[in-house]
Amino acid sequence: MPNVVIVGAQWGDEGKGKVVDLFTEFADVVVRFQGGNNAGHTLVVDGDTTILHLIPSGILHQGKTTVIGNGVVIDPLVLVEEMDLLARKGLEVEGGRMVVSRKAHVIMPWHKRLDLLRERRRAKAAIGTTGRGIGPTYEDKAARQGIRVEELVQPDIFRARVESRLDEVNDVLRGLGGDSFTVDEVVKPYAAAAERLRPLAADAALLLHERIVDGANILFEGAQGTQLDLDHGTYPYVTSSNTVAGNAAIGAGIGPTVIDEVVGISKAYTTRVGAGPFPTEIFGHDGEALREAGSEYGATTGRPRRCGWFDVPVLRYAARANGLTGVALTKLDVLTGLEKVPICTAYRLDGEIIQRFPDDQASLQRVEPVYETMPGWSGSIRTARSYADLPVQARNYVERIEELGGVQVVLVSVGPGRDDTIVRSNPFG
Ligand code: GDP
Ligand code: IMO
Ligand code: MG
C-alpha cells in the first residue's frame, strides 16, 4: 500500500497539480500538508482548466477523500470561493469529500496587509511574495498567537481571539504606515465562510491514521518547491514553510515511516517567480521565447515567470533534500524546435568547478553555470504516449538528466492535459 509524496524539485510551478491529478486515480486520499493560497496548481482535463490554490488536486476524481492538513495556512474567503468554483463545475466538495484540519492556521486580513507593507518597506530587497499573507501567518503560528480553524468555526471564540490580537496587530500596522482594523471589519467578512467550513473541520491526522491502518493509499501534495523551502531553499528568497518531503509527515500529522515513495516534479527547464538567486536564468530574447512557448505566467498572481535552462545541481540537491525515489519531468514539449538544448551540469565558483548547489548565500551569488548542449528535436511530441514515441534526441535529453541527476525519470509530461503523459514507472506500483 504505497504512500507517495509529491514535491516541487525547483522553484515551484513545476506541474505538481497535473501530476497529483494524474496519480489520484491510484490513491484513496489526497492531502495538502503545507503552504497556502500562495500556491496555484493547474489541472487540465478534457480541455477544461481548473486552478486550485487550497483544495487538493485530487478533488476532480469522484470517490476520493481530500484533506487540508494542519500544516496548511488557509484564507477562508479563498477556500470558500474555490468550493463555489468547483460547485459551478458540478463538483461537490462539501458532503464528506473534503476535510480541513482543525489545527490548520487561518490567514487573517491583517496578515495580508502586513505582507504587503513589509514588501513595500523592503523596497529593492523585496522577496516578491504573492501578497497572500503567508509569511505573517506562519510567524504568528511560531509565536504561538495564531488563530486556528478550530477557533474560526466557533463565532464567540473567534471574536474573542480577534479582540485579544487587535491591540498589538494595530500597533504594528500603524508602525509600518498602514491602516488599522476594527473587530467588526475582521469578524464580519469571515462569518459566512466560517459557517461553511464548520462541517468540514475535523481531526485530519486521526482520519489519515485510520485510513492508513485500513490499507488506503495516501498521496501527499506539496506546494511551492525545494528551492523555496524555508530552511533548505535560497533564503531569504523563500516561502515561510518547509516544502521538502520531510514536512509531509508534520504537516499531515502522520509518522515519517508511513511514507514509501517521494516523487520530485521538475520542469525540463527552470522557472522562478519572485526575486532571488537563479543561476541558469536566461535574459533577453531567448528567455522571452521560452516564457511564451511555456506560457510561463503565474497561476496565482499572473506575474511573468523568469525562465532558465535545466539545472542539474538543483535536481541533485532536490534528490538529496527530499530523498527522491523518482523525478517527473514536465513540459518537455516546450523545448521542441530548439536546435540545441543547453543543460547546466555544474557551476564555476571562483575558478573552480563544483557539482553541488552551494549552501551559503555568498557563493550562490557568485556561481556561474557550466553548460553542455544536447541536440534538439523538431516536430510536435504532444501526442507521444509511450517513451518510444519520443524522438531519439528527446529521449537522450531525458536520459542525460537522469544520468547527471542520479535519479530515475519516472514520468515525462508532454502537454498540460491529464492524458499528455508518459508514465515510465508508477510510484503506486
Ligand atoms: P504547479 O504549481 O506545480 O501545480 O504548476 P502550475 O500549475 O503553477 O504551472 C504549471 C503550468 O504548466 C500549468 O499551466 C500547467 O497546465 C502547465 N503544464 C503542466 N505540465 C505541462 C506539460 O508537460 N507541457 C505543457 N506545455 N504545459 C504543462
Ligand atoms: P506552487 O505551489 C512559485 C514564491 C513567491 C515568492 C516567494 C515567497 O504553485 O508551485 P510567499 O507568498 O509564499 O511568501 O512568497 O515564494 N512562491 C511561489 N512560486 N510557485 C508557488 O506555488 C509559490 N508560492 C510562493 O513568488 O518568490
Ligand atoms: Mg503553481
Image (tube, rainbow, N blue to C red):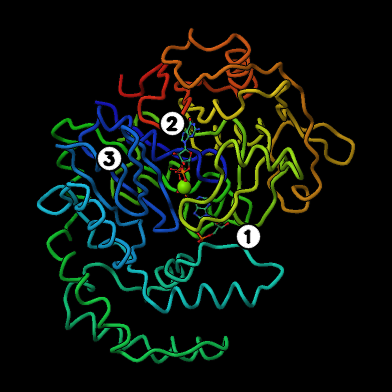
> Disc 2 residue type?
Val
If you read the primary sequence from the N terminus, does the residue marked by circle 1 or circle 3 appear first? 3
Compared to residue 239, the image places residue 224 above or below, namely above
Q: Which quarter of the figure is the C terminus placed in?
A: top left
> Disc 1 residue type?
Pro
Residue at the farthest right position = 351
Query: Which callout, 2 or 3, points to the residue nearer the camera?
Result: 3
- The residue pinned by badge 2 equals 263
Q: Which quarter of the figure is the N terminus placed in?
A: top left
- Indicate the position of residue 341 as horizontal and vertical percent values: 70, 24
- Indicate the position of residue 122 as horizontal and vertical percent values: 66, 73
| 3D distance between C-alphas at marks 2 and 1 | 25 Å
Write the residue at 43% across / 31% down. 263
- The residue pinned by badge 3 equals 58
Callout 3: 10 Å neighbours few (<14), some, many (20+)? Answer: many
- The residue pinned by badge 1 equals 236
The quarter of the displayed image where residue 175 is located: bottom right
Callout 1: 10 Å neighbours few (<14), some, many (20+)? Answer: some
Write the residue at 43% across / 33% down. 416
- Indicate the position of residue 408 as horizontal and vertical percent values: 51, 20
Determine whether, in the image, residue 363 is placed left or right of residue 192.
right
- Residue toward you, 220 or 341: 341
For label 1, the SS is: loop
